[in-house]
Amino acid sequence: MSMKGGIGHGLHRGTCQSVDKGAGHPLAARMSDAVKMSFGQGLAASVPLILGYAPIAFSFGVAATRSGLTGWEAVALSLIMYSGAAQFVAIALLAAGAPLVVAAATLIGMALRHVLYGPSLLRHAGADGTTRHAWAWAFGLTDEVFAAALGELARGRRFSEPFMFGLGLGAYGAWLSGTVAGAWAGGGALAAWPAVNAGLGFMLPSLFLALLLSMFTRAQVPVIVVAGGVTVAVTVLVSGTAGLLAGMLAGAVAGVWSAGRQRDAV
Amino acid sequence: MRSEVAALVLIVGACTWAFRYFPLRARLHDLAAGSVLGRFLAATGPAAIATLFAAEVMPYLQVAVTRQLPLLTGIAAVLAAFAWRRSVVVATLAGSVTFGVISALVAS
């Protein structure tokens, strides 16, 4: 989930890079001796995700009902879409009366980054990277579940599909129950608690900044600067929806250009 | 449930699942990292997060500078907490709590 977001273990760049070093790295030998992670270990690893997801999902439920969605509609977004940041954008698009095609294109564009998570995870899993039941556990492969799984692999644990089910189930359960609680509490639930309301309102900017920090490298500076700058400019000049699409596309194009220059320099 | 909401949820939900699942089966991890498509996909994640952060922060910047103390302290808390723990969870909660507390103090 940009929250897709949502949140998870901070992805330690150093440890993950060590996994990339391949079979010759000492970590590879350590991994070969380790036992594959179990379903229970997956659930245990999901505890930080549960702590992070629950308040954000609660604020989603509150925000959704506040913006005019019914409780069932809010829960359906979490149950079927299960994509945190996209869900918040969805309620903004629905509240603004955006046409279905525009709303769907925006949200699908936001989800495109998930294409990278599975291949990256399998590359780090090595020979343990089975996909027999991936049709099911891939549903829960959010930004944070991906980051948490990668973090476990970076610590020398061995990939298994039961582990992915445990990790994903804990996170999904927290997201769903948080949404139900927020939708049940309703849009006016926090009116008497302005400080809590303000804090929950700032949860997403905090989350996106933290996610940005977790994946920050020097090579991504052009991507971040271009994406942020274009978003602000197009939002001011055109609209918020156009700003989101333009920012993402411009940032990705900047990434293609930047990576090409670096490759040429080498 | 309204039909447009149901349609949006089903379309986006199906695409999100497809984006998460099919690359696993298509062995996209064998895709050359240096290809244009590979580079574009690699940059999409950070670009999306940066875009969302900018979009989320913009409304907070549209108030007077003197009322931006909660925003500044919230961002500072995220940066400090992430530097301390390297955890997205801790950093997010630190930013949110700090923003809420400072907002209450400023309002009182």
Image: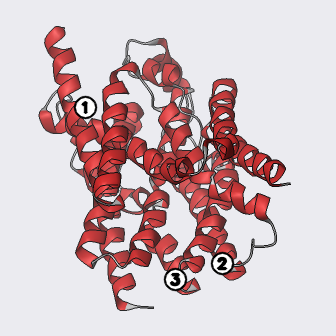
Q: Which residue type does callout 2 highlight?
A: Gly
Mark earlier in primary sequence (3, 1): 3
- Please tell me how many numbered marks the rendered image carries: 3
Q: Which residue type does callout 3 highlight?
A: Leu
Q: Position of residue A185 (x, y in %)?
A: 72, 79
- Vertical placement of residue A255 versus A243, above or below: above
- The CA span between labels 3 and 2 is 10 Å
Q: Position of residue A221 (x, y in %)?
A: 36, 25
**Label 2 crowding class (10 Å Cα cut-off): few <14, some 14-19, many 20+?**
some
- Vertical placement of residue B75 versus A143, above or below: above
Residue matched to label 2: A187
Q: Secondary structure at mark 3?
A: loop
Q: Residue at x 27, y 78 (%)?
A: A99
| Residues at discs 1 and 2 both on one chain | yes
Q: Residue at x 49, y 24 (%)?
A: A13
Please state which of residues B42 and A261 is positioned toward the viewer in this rendering: A261
Mark earlier in primary sequence (1, 2): 2
Q: Chain of mark 2?
A: A
**A85 horizontally vs A106: left or right:** right
Q: Position of residue A93 (x, y in %)?
A: 39, 71
